[in-house]
Image (cartoon, helix red, strand yellow):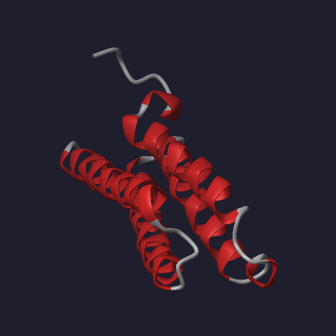
């Protein structure tokens, strides 16, 4: 495994970026009435996940842990907002499966990073 030089080397950040791009693409197809509602909220949450991983990585240990918790909070928001989109059938079939799988992977990776940073004092 190559050394981690900056946040872009973190697998959690890379997958969180993939998630943000997927959310942007999926929300393009939402009804116009949702562009400033659910679509906007999902986009904000999705961008917050990798943003907080990156911001935390650039700071001291305590701030890093705090930003990873914020990232996980945004991940929780996005998971809930995605469930609303599923129930409204804005995201269905293969795209629903893809979003659920990527959400799960990003959550596991971010929690793993938090555990590694928090115990690696």
Which residue is nearer to you in this view: 51 or 121? 51
Residue 45 horizontal/vertical position (percent): 58, 68
Which residue is nearer to you in this view: 83 or 6? 83
Residue 88 horizontal/vertical position (percent): 54, 85
Q: Is residue 98 left or right of residue 45?
A: left
Q: Is residue 97 left or right of residue 26?
A: left
Residue lying at 21% horizontally and 42% vertically, measured from the top left: 120
Which residue is nearer to you in this view: 120 or 29? 29
Residue lying at 72% horizontally and 83% vertically, measured from the top left: 37
Which residue is nearer to you in this view: 36 or 47? 36
Residue, far left = 119
Q: Quadrant of the C terminus?
A: top left
Q: Is residue 52 left or right of residue 35?
A: left
Residue lying at 58% horizontally and 74% vertically, measured from the top left: 90
Residue 100 against residue 80 in the figure, above or below: above
Residue 117 against residue 28 in the figure, above or below: above
Residue 13 against residue 85 in the figure, above or below: above
Residue 24 horizontal/vertical position (percent): 66, 56
């Amino acid at each position: 495994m190559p050394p981690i030089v900056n946040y872009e080397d973190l697998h959690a950040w890379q997958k969180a970026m993939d998630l943000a791009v997927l959310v942007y693409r999926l929300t393009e197809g939402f009804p116009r009435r949702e562009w400033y509602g659910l679509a906007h909220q999902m986009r904000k949450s999705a961008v917050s996940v990798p943003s907080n991983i990156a911001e935390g990585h650039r700071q001291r240990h305590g701030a890093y842990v705090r930003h990873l918790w914020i990232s996980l909070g945004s991940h929780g928001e996005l998971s809930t907002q995605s469930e609303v989109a599923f129930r409204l059938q804005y995201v269905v079939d293969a795209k629903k499966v893809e979003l659920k799988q990527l959400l799960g992977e990003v959550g596991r990776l971010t929690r793993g990073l938090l555990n590694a940073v928090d115990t690696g004092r």
